[in-house]
Image (cartoon, rainbow, N blue to C red):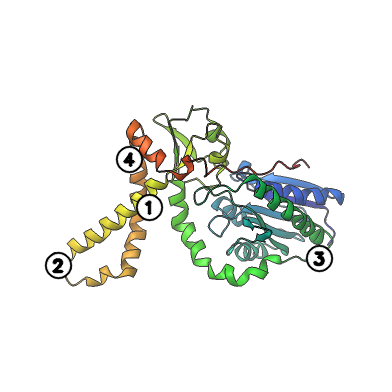
Amino acid sequence: MKFKKVIIYLFSGTGNAKNTAFWIGDEVKRKGIDIEIVSIDKIHNQEIPKPPDYTLVGFCSPTHGFHFPEIMRKFICRFPKADNCNAFVVNTRAGLRIGKMFLPGLSGVLHYWSSLILIKKGFKIVGLRPVDLPSNWLLLHPALRKTGVDLIFKHTEPKVRQFAKNILSGKKDYRALYDIIQDTLISPVAIGYMYVGRYLFAKSFISSSDCDNCGICKKTCPVNAIKQVNGRMFWTYKCESCMKCMNNCPQKAIETAHGFILVFIFLLVTLLRYGLKQLLTIEPFKDLYWLRTGVMEFVIFSVLFIPFLILAYRIMHWLLRFKIFERFIVYTSLSKYKFWGRYKAPKTKNEI
């Protein structure tokens, strides 16, 4: 099919997916095809126009918990049906560099899920491609050093451009299918993240006393997940953990409260086990010994997790007004320390 237009819908926090979309867009421009790149955080609540016939539609987003973040999942689900249109799906995922070796990340189920939804909407899938760029998830690990980040970008950009050339010339590129075995095996993790994990991460951010209330994090949050409560920034459950706020805070005042999360999980597990033990000493419940099995404890923990986390985060946010508590939370946050660092995607040409 000869494309009359290419539209790329992207979601990006710190710039990996954005750079990927613009690399593809640059190749489209070189072909002399009309190109439009749209950031979905600006239109995700608006009506999506139906793409014209003979349009190539792309979806580009980071990988969160081995799936697309919720904003992109919902966007694809409500995308209009199309006639005579092709589509491709590109995700950025956590690539690594060890010595001279470049190691790929994992994508999970996002390609297969997205393909099924888009095929049902009348699209022909011509490309599925994972893009290995440095992870920005300071929730879980320190930021990669600038040298390593630059090398990963330099290694990956030509592959993305070749992917664009392939699909623009009428070829199919299903590189994502090479990883179908490991991606399928980790699908339970993706499901767990969707329903539990992302809520935990959303409630791990705090603003320290270094915050000068400049409001940059609140203004630039792509999903409007940050509000001010009692004079301090507060993260709601809209948070996608895209890390834009933490990595762009000029005062480096946003921390991941690792100590709070560990204490919360420890107290919840301890409370659960003690509570069940006491419950089974009461006459009407003595025969319910099966509640003490590992499976049932996990089920009960999962049910209690979200409401208890909401309560615990609210309490912590209130206690942050006290200096001694605020200092404890900050200094038990690994992101406070210099070795943890912050992530910055290299500045590349991103104008089409």
Residue 81 visible in image = no
Mark 2 or 1 closer to N-term?
Answer: 2
> Is residue 347 placed above or below 289 in the rendered structure?
above
Frontmost of labels 3 and 4 is: 4
The residue indicated by pointer 2 is: 284
Secondary element type, mark 3: loop
Separation of residues labelled 4 and 2 (CA atoms)? 34 Å
Query: Seen in the image, is 329 located left or right of residue 50?
Result: left
- Residue 295, percent from left and from top: 34, 69
Secondary element type, mark 2: helix
Mark 3 or 4 closer to N-term?
Answer: 3
Instruction: Give the quadrant of the C terminus.
Output: top right
The residue at the point 31 percent across, 65 percent down is: 297
The residue indicated by pointer 4 is: 315
Residue 201 visible in image = yes
> Is residue 129 placed above or below 39 in the rendered structure?
below
Frontmost of labels 2 and 1 is: 1
Query: Seen in the image, is 155 located left or right of residue 169?
Result: left
Separation of residues labelled 3 and 4 (CA atoms)? 56 Å
Q: Answer with the quarter of the image where residue 273 lies.
A: bottom left
Frontmost of labels 4 and 1 is: 4
- Residue 36, percent from left and from top: 76, 46
- Amino acid type of the residue that numbered disc 4 sits on in the rendered structure: Ile
Label 2: few (<14), some (14–19) or many (≥20) C-alpha neighbours in 10 Å: few
- Amino acid type of the residue that numbered disc 3 sits on in the rendered structure: Lys
Decide which of 26, 223 is in the foreground and name it.
Answer: 26
The residue indicated by pointer 3 is: 171
Q: Are marks 3 and 4 in contact (CB under 8 Å)?
A: no
Q: Are marks 4 and 1 in contact (CB under 8 Å)?
A: no
The residue at the point 43 percent across, 56 percent down is: 196
Instruction: Give the quadrant of the N terminus.
Output: bottom right
Separation of residues labelled 3 and 1 (CA atoms)? 46 Å
